[in-house]
Amino acid sequence: MNQAPENYALLTVEGKEIQLPLIIGSEGEKGIDISGLRRDTSCVTIDPGFMNTASCYSQITYIDGEKGILRYRGYDIQELCKKVMFVDVAYLLVHGELPGESERRNFSRQLNLNSMIHEDMRRFFDNFPQGAHPMCILSTMINAMAAFYPQVDLKSMADNIDDSCARVISIVRTMAAFAYKKSIGEPVVYPRQDLSYCANFLNMMFDSPVRPYVISPEAVRLLNTLFIIHADHEQNCSTSAVRVIGSAQVNLYATISAGISALSGPLHGGANQAVIEMLRMIQEDGDVEKFIRLAKDKSSPFRLMGFGHRVYKTYDPRAEIAKMECEKYLASSGYTDPLLDVARRVEEAARKDSYFIDRQLYPNVDFYTGILYRALGIPENMFTVMFALARLPGWVAHWKEMIGDSTKLVRPRQIYMGRTGDEAKREIEKRSIAAHLI
């Protein structure tokens, strides 16, 4: 961050001029520091949806939506997917640097040692109703972790932060697999010491006493890629929720539970499931052009899910990776999915249409990832859970960065538009007079 004294924005409010410092980030991003605005002018800014508001400084993730750039700690997402595994990216996000060999071994050891669920927590799974959504189970179970692992308050963070971060990244993976097994009525499968992070998850999900699961190296590679492209994405809804809740010095597990709750909504983490439902509907109808017309019709409730993004005004770099993996994995595994052909036709039609071109609406990360999860055998009600597992290192990194910055309690202002005090006073006087007449 740079702040040159000659760089500022000049604001005039009711005849009074104030200078607002211009902040320049390490990649050239510009922001106007309004932290003293209310003190100097008695005014606040209003920005519904925080479309133009930077809520913090961060060294974790950089996005350029116009150029289609996504970097974790300076590393391009494409290079990370090619060169390293998800465990390396998790370490990078949480610790700031890619691990050397000794750091990688130690971090993997921490993940392995913290992969078991406290046995008393096992009973909790039995009390959820059959068919409970895995996201509901997951958020509840994570919140309960503070009772079993209490050393997660700020006073103990200096000594235990690495263990706490490794525990939540690892144990939530086990919880997710247990939640899935619970939802289908099968016995849980414990993590294995000899398996990698992603291989362990696939084995816990799909191994069975009557149907042993054969771990495919290509499936493990694909899951690593999917987890990497979802690992962080700057100040999105769930990450902002983590920072807001964490600013109250809430324990790590309750904070992560809040992130999962935010992620569960259809406009955030649930979008890839909505894409699959949409593609299935288009497949059944068969007329792609019809749905393109409906998407452009403001009077139609139909929305083309998986297109457009709040930040990206070009092709989402994560969508490019997911699309390439669709072609690669489905070809190598022999798995066929008719929804991939539908997705191709929808993208081709949309990218030729001026409506989408003019509005810079391109496929986002959700458009192809659901197809990949289907290819791995992941059921649709687990799609959002997969998103949560991948996003854990990002949430933990932002939480760790936030508490290190001595962040103040997040407390936005508002513009009140309700009944005035004078109006309320007149109304209550009328009621008082009416009461005396009864």
Image (cartoon, rainbow, N blue to C red):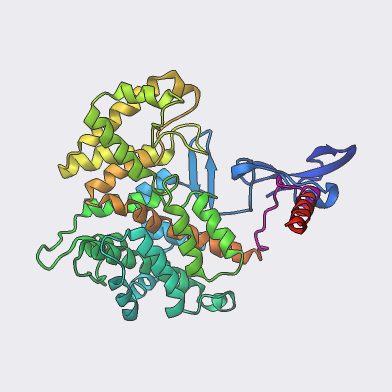
The residue lying toward the viewer, choosing from 320 and 125, is 125
Front residue of 238 and 90: 238
What is the magenta segment's predominant secondary structure?
loop
Position in image of residue 161 (x %, y %) = 51, 72
**Depth check: 170 or 134 in front?**
134
Is residue 104 visible to the viewer in this orientation of the structure? Answer: no
Which quarter of the rendered picture does the C terminus lie within? bottom right
Q: Is residue 17 left or right of residue 404?
A: right
Across and down, in percent, residue 244 comes to: 59, 59
Q: Give the residue at the far right of this rendering.
A: 15
Please name the residue shown 24% across and 36% down the image: 339
Image quadrant where residue 402 sits = bottom right
User: Seen from this angle, which residue lies furthest front?
Assistant: 438
Query: Toward the viewer: 378 or 136?
Result: 136
Q: Position of residue 318 (x, y in %)?
A: 40, 42
Q: Which residues are magenta?
A: 408-424
Query: Which residue shows up at 54% across the image and 56% down it?
Result: 241
Is residue 418 one of those drawn in magenta? yes
* Residue 422 drawn at (x, y percent): 81, 49
Give the residue drawn at x 43%, y 50%. Answer: 265
